[in-house]
Image: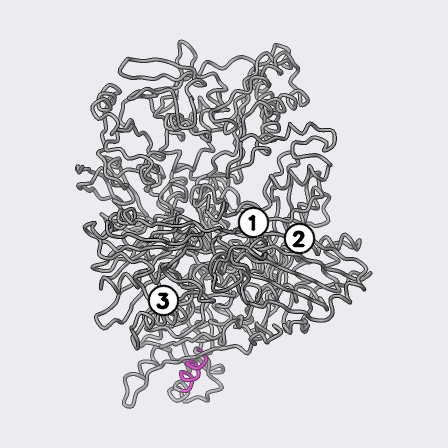
Amino acid sequence: MRQFTYLTPKTLDEAISLHVAHGESARYVAGGTDVLVKIKEGKFAPDYLISLKHIIGQDRPFLNQETGELYIGAFCTHGSIEQSPLVQHHYPIIHDAVKNIGSVQIRNVATIGGNLVNAVPSADGAIPLIVLDSKANIYGTKGQRSVDLQRFFLGPGQCDLEAGEILTEIVIPPPLPRTGSAYIKHGRREAMELPMLGVGVLLCLEEDMTTCAKARICLGVAAPTPFRALAAEKYLKGKTVDENNLTEAGRLAGQESKVRDSIRGVAWYRREMVGVLVKRMGLKALERAKERHK
Amino acid sequence: MQNLCSVGKRVPKLDAVDKATGRVKYIQDLKVAGMLYGKILYSKYAHAKIVKINTTRARELPGVLAVLTGDDIPDIRMGVYKDNRPLKKEKVCSFRDEVAAVAATSPEIAEAALKRIEVTYEALPAIFDPEAAMKEGAPLIHEAHKTNVLKMPWKLHYGDVEAAKKEAAHTVEDRFTTTWVTHCCMGTSGAIADFDPANNLTIHTNTQIPSLAQKDFLEALKTMGISDRRVRVVKPCIGGGFGSKLDTYAYEYIAILLAFHTRRPVKIEFDRTEEFIATSTRQPTITHISQGCDQNGKLLFRDIAMILDNGAYTSWGATTPSVMMMPITTLYRVPNVRYEAKCVYTNNTYAQAMRGYGNPQATYAIESTMDMLAEAAGIDPVEFRRINANQPGDVSTQGLRITTCGLTECMHAVKEKLEWDRPRQAGEGIGMASLIHVGGGARVYKSDGCGTIIKMDDFGKIDLFTGATDMGQGSDTVIAQIVAEELGLEVDDIHVIHTDTDVCPWDVGSHASRTTFIAGNAALGAARKLKARILEMGAKLLESPLEKLNLQGRHIVHQDDAEKKMAIGKVLRKAHFSHGGQMLMAEHFYDPANENMGKDFRGNMSMTYTFGTHGVRVKVDEETGKVEILQYVAAHDVGKAINPLLLEGQVYGGVMMGVGYALTEQVISEKGQNMNPNFRDYKILTAKDVVPIKAPVLETYDEDGPFGAKGIGEPGCVPTAPAIANAIYDAVGVRIKELPITPERVLAAIREKKGLDLCGQAVDKGDADECIIEE
Amino acid sequence: MAHEISFIFNGNAMKMNIEDHWTLLHLIREELGYTGTKEGCGSGECGACTVIVDDKAVNSCLYLAAEIDGKQLTTIEGLAAADGTLHPIQKSFVEKGGIQCGFCSPGMILSAKALLDKTPNASEIDIKEAIAGNLCRCTGYVQIIDSIKAVSGYGEDEPHVVAFKTDEGERGE
């Protein structure tokens, strides 16, 4: 592998000043499962790797008692998120996604932040977080800022990070009442898959527990960046959540998605699966909403 | 059947402890003092003239000791058709073509040197579709060959197919295609070549054919101007074979050439990408098939025309029709058979041997149409197969002599274990497919032989030298069990050595599921010779008649007199430590009485045939096209399970490889370029994809097999795809005629059957725009 | 750049100079000379290079050697007892047919160990999940899963294999 110097700052400020000092020859790394592959393939050629692993911070999700928000540090591994009882109980949609990323070995090392800043269409960690209306906290030389996670993705491999900025945490609003959500990765085998398609659906119900008060639908690999199916969401609002309406919402979502052909799947099939899986995740979300409401 | 002590037992693999502790050495783990690292530069075009190669900048790099191109090497020819050379000259015919090679003091320097080689190409029109390549005016892959169709006349006609067609009450006809899949050995390819000052060559290499590789390398040496020297082939532990190591490859010759030029040992080791791109695949096929039967469901004819994508060069893939002939003529009783196969050059990767050797492709077409024909005839598919099942004593049109045959019993077992008649839910279906495979060797060369040498030491322990190759399947253990049984020893007493042509006897290779049968018989023959000598000595020492003595529990025992007993080790010590002493050693060469194919391809190629039936219960998701396997039963007539533990391992492994072949695996090739050379996108199945498998074993005790055994290395992956395809048809009424059976193909077929377009709209009424695929 | 790290290697304290860009796999195979850890793909897709760091299975091909500083590293060579007695998982792999060509075995066994150390009563589902990142081409995983199941406290299922006709009558497991 290409030679580089490995730097292990203990604070965010230290990390950023190292980045400023080394400029373009430096690259941040957390778990490294993606960065090291890219260095081996010659796609990255850094002289300095600045590790974010040693920065003191939360290494597992925690609840902000005041606001009820869930904080997931960007340097949390997928494994720590997967095993978090908080996530399992209150945000099963996140669990749906992280438990199927890579393998145990990858999840023990790879971080959610790394998954997000890669911004590849197939990185499916983002979809549930967008469905949950999460925000991304970003830290840089100009201090801290916060963006809607949905707006964080600018294009394939591009995200809203200025030079030297670091994605530090994801903030997820408290679970809404009468709400359920679910995510599915559609692939060709049961493990070690990058999604051919990822579908996340959140449904917030009226007090009658049948009418949709709000829907959030986000699709992965259906467009260059995580894609909100707004027409489908709009269609569901105020309607009874049932198989028929979810089928129509799925059809709309398929129509508005920007699927394409790749070696991992053809466009027509992806579009069709958007329809099927929006419906299925909608039904699962409904079921979860009812369970929680009991 | 006699009382058996070692044979038939679940004996762990002899090398399992070394493997479980990480002690064994694969080619990746070997280093030779002073070793250099070789790397290969591959073509950037599917078809192009090599105008110029400038290696100056590569040579200038410190640490680079040699840079070779096609112009620097003699005309070494490789492959069955001798149409390939280690480094290409004048033109390249596929993306995997080797254009130049470097030897350097480290892999990193070698890699850097490759980047400094400048190759000027002039692109030529390329062709990737074998049917198009057969047409007049298609670009020629090898101009001197004058045509893209290989001059290998795979053509037979037994009986009268045309007359039978007229007579048939029911006929089906269809087209089936299969694509490239690859072995995916977990241990990648590699070799270390090393010359001594007298130009004797030692090559450490992953091979299933040490003796034939030795011959290939000797020929190469001769072309290099080195005659009358020795070649020693040393096999490291092999990280998976599956047919991939049945030929010699460019990288081995390149290692030899680099070693010769640098006078240093040179190692070439593939990385995973290279393993995907530069090793050979299973051959893709296009099969036109028709079969017909009479009113009562008796098969009358089978008519098959096949096109094989040979790729740019010729390895064993081109000869797979010779094995396909076996299921085509002899899977079920068929009186009239016609078969013609054409192997066609294209600018794709070239194919090789892979587990089943053509049989999976042929059986996919045969067993799919068996179900179709049963339906046309209105007969239950199991009953239809039973009517036509081979029986012991049959001689097929091709002259294959069926000795033991448990096909009907295998079908019955599948029916029972799969609960065939259980009511099925919506989307659920069951399917069955059977197989025949060579189980008693396969005479593809003039010899089908294997040698064994055994010697016994002072303590009654055996060193056994075999020509066979254990690449993980466990042949060493099976051989040890056979010898232990014959000599009244424990399996632990037998040390099997198979790694070195300097000490191991000759063998044609580990292929055709032949090792248990052939190497087993060779070992048994040697053990018998040794046993006779031990008993002869024992008779003198114990002053007993020879016929009363036997070997048992590491002793010579007298069958009537428990007092008369002597440890075998003691017999040996007496043999060694006496005037006029002797050593106990025996050799045996077993070459079975099977036959080479004659001019019309008739001939009993194997001493016996392995039969089996696979049954599967699937659930098809009609909305997504996904196929879930709920139950899988793989029943085989194995003659005798010498080691049930290892036998089951062969069946499970074969079935899972077959399920991958059926459902998920494909080399995605775009204009000759491998688009998925990694485990992310080449979908071999994972532990989470394991299907619930039952593997009933039928023992028919073949009298030619060692202790009754037949070969079982390959059958596990032979009928998997058609069994699954038949179950899908049963479930949702669509027949998938193309592998792999992807969710897309299933969903498209379901839609088509319902008269809908791909987007689920009625074909006539639907808005055509809806279906436009955006980029 | 080189710097010094300290770590526990298979129970023994080590101190050595490493280069920043070394992977853990390189450290183990090329510098320490322990070749039981295999490279199957170099990109985290096959699991042949799996080792245990502290209590977690990781792909050593995508793990920087520098990161092992202060940690415990277990490779396949560290499993058997000093007198050669196999670890129960190794023994089970040997006896249950969990090993064929053996190239995936060290990684597979270490993934199993990381699982069972944490979840001694691992179910079949847990086992499949734990080894989903360890590819095997020989066994079809069936006997690997059997091997791990046999040493988990979860208990064994019915055998997969049943004989249906032999001269000696029924032969089951």
Residue C145, given in percent of the width and then of the height, sits at 48, 47
Residue B541 colored in magenta in the image: no
Residue A64, given in percent of the width and then of the height, sits at 39, 13
Residue B587, given in percent of the width and then of the height, sits at 40, 80
- Mark sitting on residue B659: 1
In the image, what residue type sits under mark 3?
Asp
The residue lying at 40 percent from left, 51 percent from top is B275
Q: Are marks 2 and 1 on the same chain?
A: yes
Give whichever of B183, A56 is nearer the camera: B183
Give whichever of A101, B744 is nearer the camera: B744
Which residue range is magenta in the image?
Answer: B527-536
Can residue B416 be seen from the camera position used here? no
Locate residue A265 relative to residue B523 in the image: left or right: right
Mark 2 / mark 3, whichever is N-terminal:
3
Q: Is residue B489 above or below residue B303?
A: below
Label 3 sits on residue: B75
